[in-house]
């Protein structure tokens, strides 16, 4: 499988990654510098602390995670990651000559991912926000705003801007109970509702033919590969079996997007029943697909409330949330596993049309079955104790030697548990306990 930086490098580009990788590192072959990037400065895991660069996988499995190319970048503790990554990006722009070679620079900030720990000086302008998580979130967004400004200034200063394309995009929906907001969309990060899968983005470039407008064209993250390779003058035909489309005409000129459907996901681990011969699709499988104006969800799509922005001092659910919870269809059976929405006319997913349009349901179920035909078996090996940072001077680093045939050791899934816990009937009690635990240490951050 080839990657975007590999194709851009073949087209003559210098390629650099600054920020979060989070695409695997169990062996060196998985590192960014082995996947097409000329340089890498950042973290290999997720949820890294912004100051200490500590990262934990569970309570007792923690290590340092900041890397420069393929080595550990020790001694950076105390430097805020958004600022540190911006400084590295500016250094790359300053040292490179765009007249000699074009440049692809990917900056993957941690912000505004948890943990919410912005510099104190950025919190002060938002001191009037009563909700602490929302206040810290806003402060972290402002650090990203400043970073974008500084990078854009560097593009102008060092001669890149006139022939540049700046793409800014989120990778998923927000987490409403840690400062974010998807309002008025339904759901949150980690769900298949629009609040989880619909992302905001902008494209800024002197090369755009139609500017200062909002595009409602259908785009998917896989479209960036052929779009950017095409812009760079690369050869798309060398990459076989691409799911993406070249959407530059839709972005630059406002033309219709060539994309007509999006397979949001199929999770084969989330299935609870056997499929009958006459059934097109196992509707207990967690899946979602968009075809034209229609969106179908099966299985358990995840937390499906509409959560208003957190404006109150407490994160506990109250009247502000119950106003929306009361709009849920209380008559829906507990075993419901199919939802259908006209997502163009109803982007907030309030009107389930599954019963009214069984014909559309069957068509989209067939599309799920079609995509699933080319799915590969799940490979989910057990935890490897050799990964423990305590065995690598306290840092997260590759732990498998290149000559090892690691994939040949295991078959199937090792983290799927069949033990079903008994749910506490007091749902509100569970929610309040969850929010209290989540907010510990946060509410004390007063100005």
Image (tube, grey):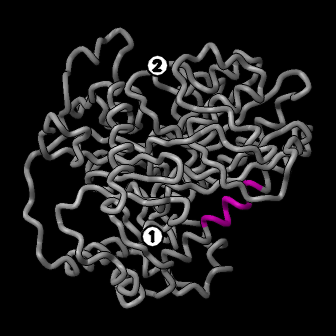
Q: Residue at x 39, y 54 (%)?
A: 192
Residue 144 is covered by the magenta coloring = yes
321 and 351: which is toward the camera: 351
Q: Position of residue 131 (x, y in %)?
A: 49, 82
Residue 441 occupies which quadrant of the picture? Answer: bottom left
Q: Position of residue 91 (x, y in %)?
A: 77, 39
Q: Position of residue 370 (x, y in %)?
A: 36, 31
Q: Residue at x 36, y 15 (%)?
A: 401
Say few, some or many: other residues with alpha carbon within 10 Å of mark 2 (under 14 / 14 to 19 / 20 or more). some
Q: Is residue 87 left or right of residue 331?
A: right
Q: Position of residue 292 (x, y in %)?
A: 53, 48
Q: Is residue 247 left or right of residue 114?
A: right
Find numbered disc 1 in the image and state the secondary structure of the residue it sits on: helix
Label disc, if present, on residue 379 of the rendered structure: none
292 and 249: which is toward the camera: 292
> What's the CA distance linking mark 1 and mark 2?
36 Å
Q: Is residue 199 left or right of residue 107?
A: left
Find numbered disc 2 in the image and state the secondary structure of the residue it sits on: helix
Q: Is any atom of residue 254 visible in this view?
A: yes
Could you tell which of marks 1 and 2 lies nearer the N-terminus? 2
Residue wearing tag 2: 29
Bounds of the magenta segment: 140-148
Residue 239 is covered by the magenta coloring = no
Q: Is any atom of residue 180 visible in this view?
A: no
Magenta-highlighted stretch: main secondary structure? helix
14 and 185: which is toward the camera: 185
Residue wearing tag 1: 176
Mark closer to the observer (1, 2):
1
Location of the C terminus by quadrant is bottom right
């Amino acid at each position: 499988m080839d990657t975007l930086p590999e194709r851009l490098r073949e087209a003559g580009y210098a390629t650099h990654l600054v920020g979060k990788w989070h695409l695997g590192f169990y062996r060196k072959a998985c590192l960014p510098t082995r996947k097409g990037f000329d340089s890498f400065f950042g973290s290999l895991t997720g949820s890294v602390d912004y100051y200490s660069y500590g990262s934990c996988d569970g309570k007792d499995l923690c290590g340092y995670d900041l890397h420069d190319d393929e080595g550990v970048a020790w001694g950076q503790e105390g430097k805020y990651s958004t600022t540190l990554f911006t400084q590295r990006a500016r250094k790359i722009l300053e040292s490179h000559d765009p007249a000699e070679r074009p440049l692809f620079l990917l900056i993957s900030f941690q912000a505004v991912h948890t943990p919410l720990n912005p510099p104190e000086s950025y919190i002060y302008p938002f001191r009037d926000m009563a909700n602490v998580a929302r206040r810290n979130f806003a402060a972290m967004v402002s650090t990203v705003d400043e970073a974008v400004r500084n990078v854009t200034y560097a593009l102008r200063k060092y001669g890149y801007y006139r022939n540049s394309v700046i793409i800014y995009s989120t990778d998923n929906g927000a987490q409403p109970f840690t400062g974010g907001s998807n309002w008025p969309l339904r759901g949150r990060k980690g769900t298949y509702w629009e609040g989880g899968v619909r992302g905001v983005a902008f494209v800024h470039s002197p090369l755009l033919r139609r500017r200062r407008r909002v595009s409602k064209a259908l785009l998917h993250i896989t479209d960036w590969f052929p779009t950017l390779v095409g812009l760079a003058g690369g050869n798309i035909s060398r990459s076989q079996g691409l799911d993406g489309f070249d959407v530059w005409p839709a972005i630059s000129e406002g033309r219709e997007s060539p994309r007509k459907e999006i397979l949001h996901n199929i999770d084969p681990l989330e299935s609870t029943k056997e499929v009958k011969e006459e059934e097109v699709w196992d509707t207990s499988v967690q899946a979602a697909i968009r075809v034209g104006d229609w969106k179908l969800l099966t299985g358990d799509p995840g937390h499906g409330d509409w959560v208003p922005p957190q404006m109150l001092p407490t994160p506990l659910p109250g009247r502000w949330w119950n106003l929306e919870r009361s709009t849920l269809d209380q008559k829906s059976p507990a075993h419901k596993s199919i939802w259908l929405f006209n997502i163009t006319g109803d982007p907030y997913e309030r009107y389930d049309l599954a019963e009214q349009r069984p014909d559309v349901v069957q068509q989209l179920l067939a599309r799920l079955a079609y995509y699933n035909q080319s799915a590969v078996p799940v490979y989910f090996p057990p935890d490897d104790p050799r990964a423990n940072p305590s065995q690598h001077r306290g840092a997260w680093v590759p732990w498998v030697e290149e000559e090892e045939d690691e994939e040949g050791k295991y078959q199937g899934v090792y983290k799927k548990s069949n033990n079903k816990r008994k749910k506490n009937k007091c749902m509100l009690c569970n929610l309040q306990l969850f929010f209290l635990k989540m907010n510990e240490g946060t509410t004390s951050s007063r100005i």
